[in-house]
Image: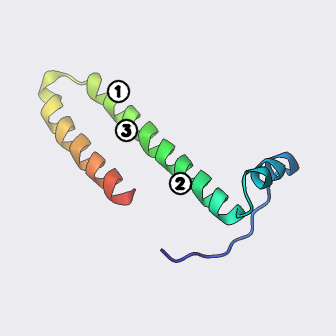
Amino acid sequence: MANRSISISLEEGLLAQLDAQGSNRSALVSEALLQWLARRRIDALNTAYAHLASLEAGDLAEAGEAAVAMGLAAEADG
C-alpha cells in the first residue's frame, strides 16, 4: 500500500506518550488508526446484530442475508 504524508496536530501529552512507544511516529499513528477503524467496524456489526435480534420472524431471513452481505463487505474492506 502506498503511503502519503500528512500533517496532524496532537496534544503535547499524547505526543510524549507516542514518542515513548517508539521512534517511528508514522507507524504508530497508522497502527492506532487501523485499530480505530477496526473498532468502528465492530461497533457497526454489533448495531446490526442488535437490530437483527429485534426483528420478527418474517423479516429474519431477509435481515440475515443483509447481515452476511455486510459482514463480507466489512471483511473485504479490512
Drawn side of residue 1 relative to residue 62, left or right:
right
Q: Residue at x 79, y 51 (%)?
A: 20
Mark 3: few/some/many CA within 10 Å (<14, 14-19, 20+): some
Please report whichever mark, 2 or 3, sits nearer to the chain's N-terminal start.
Answer: 2
Residue 44 vertical position relative to residue 74 in the rendered view, above or below: above
Closest to the observer, 22 or 39: 22
Identity, as a three-letter code, of the amino acid under mark 2 = Leu
Please report whichever mark, 2 or 1, sits nearer to the chain's N-terminal start.
Answer: 2
Drawn side of residue 59 relative to residue 2, left or right:
left
Please report contact status of discs 2 and 1: CB closer than 8 Å, yes or no. Answer: no
Q: Residue at x 72, y 62 (%)?
A: 25
Q: Quick one: SS at disc 1?
A: helix
Drawn side of residue 38 relative to residue 45, left or right:
right
Please report whichever mark, 3 or 1, sits nearer to the chain's N-terminal start.
Answer: 3
Closest to the observer, 25 or 52: 25
Residue 20 vertical position relative to residue 47 in the rendered view, above or below: below
Which disc is residue 50 wearing?
1
x and y percentages locating residue 5 in the rendered image: 67, 75
Q: Which residue is mark 3?
A: 45
Identity, as a three-letter code, of the amino acid under mark 3 = Leu
Which disc is residue 34 wearing?
2
Q: Residue at x 53, y 54 (%)?
A: 34
Q: Quick one: SS at disc 2?
A: helix
Identity, as a three-letter code, of the amino acid under mark 1 = Ala
Task: Quote the CA–CA distance across marks 2 and 3.
Answer: 17 Å
x and y percentages locating residue 10 in the rendered image: 80, 54
Which disc is residue 77 wearing?
none
Q: Quick one: SS at disc 3?
A: helix
